[in-house]
Image: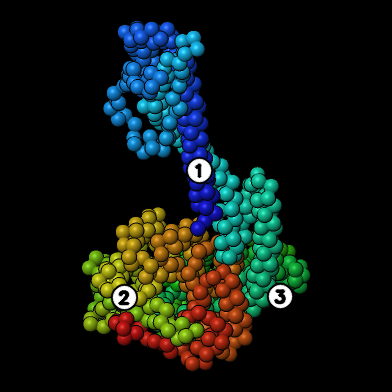
């Protein structure tokens, strides 16, 4: 039971005891006082009546006696007046008929009003002539006390109710810092080191909050130092120290992973950029000036290409840059390259003192399944030919042979836009399921949902048609269609046979104005299946829509759904954003898993991720586990789960998967 509830119950009990006690004492004291007053009044009446009756009674004037008794009885609140002679015989008696019962019996029994009667002996001279007894009317006393008790009860109930509300408000205000402390402790567990402000007014609570704030600041420093140390080592392995871009090792790993994944949608353009004349420039102006030029060239290279979602840019050697641009046509990339080279040639200080720096670019189209070495050779050949022209020339390798990388030629599809419109409208997709297996006990964690489309009776993987979905701006509609299919499927299954499903969301959908509103409304209308849905978004979304993604993560968690960061490690982003997102898991990109058994840098990166993720209570999974050596190593590194063809191929039936 919470402290707030305990205090409320305690205060309520005390108020009830106080109310009952005050009412009891008030009524009992009133009863005692009234009983005493009734006896005193009866005794005074008896004494006065005895003196008045002495002469008439001594003379046996019974008519006068009766008249005087009647007069006294009619003027007072008496229940009975009895006059006896010296022998004890009743001379006269007057009594009142009991009135209708106006007071509850339990109240009368509880009061027990029994006032003593007034008694007086009647004498004439020295002779005793009789005795008079006067009994007060206790029914009238009961009625008066009953009215007074009801008034006291309602008065104390009103005052007690107001006092109870005021005290509750005070208790709530006093305990608010404790609730804030509880939330702060939960935030600390999630590595969100936000201090509590303002400080409470209560001195004891203020000291506690100050101590918690000091601890929070110290923990934040320790966590930031740990993250900074891991990022420093990672940067030494994968980041170029001069430009801040990825280095050759990072770029080659990304290229290899993208082209080897049959499940991940990828096609696009590989670009090589050559900077000529840097040797002469360094001789004239020094290496520091040369490094400054390379750094500024790298900034233009990054800024021009960052509009391409999922881009990968790097400085692969001293004067050579590279870029991998997914889901782009040759024509689109050529325009971007000409724009980038134009900005680079206009940089201040690039042509000083006749020391000319020339820029050339070569590129080739690529798609899933292509040979990375062949593609690099093609791009290099295009780059070599570009250098026979003037500075700023962009050369495309063998465009006629490659064709449009985003529109694969298939006999069954003459118009991809119309074909995909029909697929979305009629929900003509075939869902496959690949299991994600626990590294701890090798049990099923969930299934990842993979989409297939039938073309001439043959299923085509997402790698072929998702780039076209993005090209024709159908991404949000496609994502909505897949989510609706999964919800229908989950609702059709018995509750005990449901298994969690992970579905990919495009960055385009997350950034769309009303997609998150639609998604949350859909989950709100299907609360029974929401806990079985895991939404995976690529890491690039953190950079392009961090605020929106953060709000979406909070809302999904409130509804029981989960959020995962996919392709973690592809953007060279800081790990710091993990402390601000409420994530279920992060999935290490396949470029770090493909050769992890032979690559010590990849092993260090994954082990570092394990420590950071587990300290945030975030699960860490891996993709594209294709061999036993990878699986055993990931289990030894204490990852939470993994998926890949070694653990289970995608199947149209979840039970088969």
Foreground disc of the pair 2, 3: 2
Front of the two marks 3 and 1: 1
Q: Earlier in the sequence, mark 2 or mark 3?
A: 3
Q: Is residue 195 above or below residue 540?
A: above
| Front in this rendered view, residue 402 or 81 | 81
Q: Which mark is residue 94?
A: none
Q: Residue at x 73, y 64 (%)?
A: 353
In percent of the image, x 47 and y 30: which residue is there?
A: 31
In the rendered image, the quadrant that contains the C terminus is bottom left
| Up-down relation of residue 340 to residue 654 (above or below) | above
Q: Earlier in the sequence, mark 3 or mark 1?
A: 1
Left or right placement of residue 563 versus residue 485 in this view: right
- Whether the residues at callouts 3 and 1 have beta carbons within 8 Å, the answer is no
Which one is in front, 654 or 21? Answer: 21
Residue under label 1: 17
Give percent across and percent down for residue 192.
Answer: 59, 61
Find residue 328 and report its horizontal and vertical position in percent.
43, 70
Name the quadrant containing residue 148: top left
Disc 2 to disc 1, how far (Cα)?
Answer: 52 Å
The chosen color scheme is rainbow
To which residue does mark 2 refer? Answer: 496
Task: Please name the residue shown 60% across and 55% down the image.
Answer: 181
What is the spatial separation of the Cα atoms under label 3 and label 1, in whole angstroms?
A: 94 Å
Whether residue 402 appears in this view of the structure is no
Q: Residues within 10 Å of mark 2 (few under 14, many from 20)?
A: few
Q: Secondary structure at mark 3?
A: helix
**Tag 3 residue:** 279
216 up-or-down from 159: above or below:
below
Q: Residues within 10 Å of mark 3 (few under 14, many from 20)?
A: some
């Amino acid at each position: 039971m919470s402290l707030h509830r305990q205090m409320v119950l305690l205060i309520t009990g005390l108020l009830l005891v106080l109310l009952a006690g005050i009412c009891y004492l008030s009524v009992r004291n009133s009863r005692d006082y009234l009983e005493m007053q009734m006896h005193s009044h009866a005794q005074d009446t008896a004494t006065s009546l005895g003196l008045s009756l002495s002469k008439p009674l001594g003379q046996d004037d019974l008519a006068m006696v009766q008249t005087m008794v009647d007069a006294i009885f009619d003027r007072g609140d008496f229940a009975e007046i009895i006059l006896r002679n010296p022998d004890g015989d009743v001379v006269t008696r007057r009594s009142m008929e009991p009135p209708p019962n106006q007071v509850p019996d339990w109240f009368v029994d509880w009061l027990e009003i029994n006032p003593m009667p007034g008694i007086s002996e009647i004498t004439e001279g020295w002779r005793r002539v009789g005795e008079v007894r006067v009994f007060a009317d206790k029914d009238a006393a009961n009625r008066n006390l009953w009215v007074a008790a009801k008034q006291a009860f309602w008065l104390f109930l009103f005052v007690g109710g107001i006092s109870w509300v005021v005290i509750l408000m005070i208790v709530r205000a006093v305990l608010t810092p404790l609730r804030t402390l509880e939330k702060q402790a939960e935030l600390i567990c999630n590595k969100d080191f936000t201090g509590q402000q303002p400080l409470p007014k209560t001195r004891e609570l203020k000291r506690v909050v100050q101590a918690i704030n000091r601890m929070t600041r110290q923990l934040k420093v320790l966590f930031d130092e740990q993250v900074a140390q891991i990022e420093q080592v990672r940067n030494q392995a994968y980041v170029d120290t001069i430009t801040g871009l990825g280095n050759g090792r990072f770029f080659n790993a990304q290229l290899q992973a993208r082209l080897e994944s049959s499940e991940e949608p990828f096609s696009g353009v590989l670009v090589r950029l050559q900077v000529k004349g840097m040797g002469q420039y360094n001789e004239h102006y020094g290496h520091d000036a040369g490094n400054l030029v390379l750094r500024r060239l790298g900034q233009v290279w990054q800024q021009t290409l960052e509009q391409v979602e999922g881009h990968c840019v790097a400085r692969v050697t001293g004067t050579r840059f590279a870029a991998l641009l997914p889901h782009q046509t040759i024509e689109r990339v050529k325009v971007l390259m000409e724009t980038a080279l134009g900005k680079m040639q206009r940089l201040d200080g690039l042509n000083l003192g006749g020391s000319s720096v020339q820029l050339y670019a070569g590129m080739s189209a690529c798609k899933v399944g292509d040979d990375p070495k062949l593609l690099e050779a093609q791009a290099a050949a295009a780059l070599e030919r570009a250098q026979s022209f003037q500075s700023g020339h962009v050369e495309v390798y063998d465009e006629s042979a490659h064709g449009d990388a985003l529109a694969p030629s298939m006999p069954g599809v003459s118009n991809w836009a119309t074909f995909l419109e029909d697929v979305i409208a009629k929900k003509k997709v075939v869902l496959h399921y690949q299991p994600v297996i626990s590294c701890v006990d090798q049990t099923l964690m969930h299934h990842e949902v993979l989409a297939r489309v039938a073309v001439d009776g043959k299923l085509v993987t997402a790698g072929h048609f998702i780039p076209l979905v993005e090209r024709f701006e159908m991404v949000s509609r496609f994502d909505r269609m897949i989510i609706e299919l999964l919800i229908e499927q989950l609702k059709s299954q018995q509750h005990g046979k449901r298994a969690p499903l992970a579905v990919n969301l495009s960055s385009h959908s997350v950034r769309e104005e009303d997609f998150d509103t639609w998604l949350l409304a859909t989950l709100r209308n299907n609360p029974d299946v929401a806990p079985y849905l895991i939404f995976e978004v690529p890491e690039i979304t953190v950079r392009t829509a961090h605020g929106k993604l953060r709000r979406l993560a909070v809302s999904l968690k409130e509804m029981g759904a989960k959020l995962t960061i996919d392709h973690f490690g592809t953007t060279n982003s800081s790990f710091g954003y993990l402390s601000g997102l409420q994530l279920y898991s992060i999935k290490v990109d396949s470029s770090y898993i493909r050769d992890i058994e032979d690559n010590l840098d990849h092993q260090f990166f994954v082990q570092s991720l394990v420590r950071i993720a587990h300290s945030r209570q975030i699960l860490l999974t891996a993709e594209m586990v294709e061999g036993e050596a990878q699986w055993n190593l990931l289990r030894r590194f204490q990852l939470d789960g993994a998926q890949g063809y070694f653990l289970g191929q995608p199947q149209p039936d979840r039970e088969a998967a």
